[in-house]
Amino acid sequence: MAAVDWLFEVDVFIPGVKEFRKSIIMRYRIYDFRLGYQFEKYELQINLNNAFNEAYTFRPDLMEAPRNISARTTLWRING
């Protein structure tokens, strides 16, 4: 959040925005990792989003996603 309208900082609609902006470091880095490998008959993929579980937001009162890990396998159908 580089700039926030004054209306959000007067605690009328969303209380605590001004205190939250003061308490967090305004610079952050989000790291996402993807690892995949294709075997003969199937493919394996692992995704790690927000690897260091950084708290960040683009809009007041809307926190972005925490750390998330997902895995996917694809089985190839080979004819013949």
Image: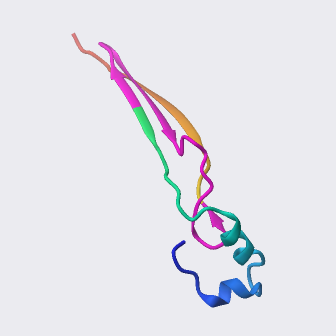
- Front-lying residue, 7 or 44: 7
- Left or right: 63 with respect to 35? right
> 30 above or below 43?
below
| Image quadrant containing the C terminus | top left
- Front-lying residue, 40 or 49: 49
Instruction: Please tell me how many numbered marks the rendered image carries.
Output: 0
Q: Quadrant of residue 13?
A: bottom right
Report x, y in % for residue 37: 35, 22
Q: Quadrant of residue 25?
A: bottom right
Residue drawn at 37 percent across, 27 percent down:
36
Residue drawn at 44 percent across, 37 percent down:
33
> 45 above or below 8?
above
Q: Is residue 46 magenta?
A: yes
| Image quadrant containing the N terminus | bottom right
How does the figure colour the protein chain or chains?
rainbow
Q: Is residue 45 magenta?
A: yes
Report x, y in % for residue 78: 27, 15
Report x, y in % for residue 19: 74, 73
Report x, y in % for residue 63: 63, 62
Residue drawn at 74 percent across, 79 percent down:
14
Q: Which residue is most to the left?
A: 80
> 20 above or below 10?
above
Q: Which residue is most to the top?
A: 80
Instruction: Specify the segment rendered in magenta.
Output: 35-63
Residue drawn at 46 percent across, 43 percent down:
32
- Left or right: 42 with respect to 56? left
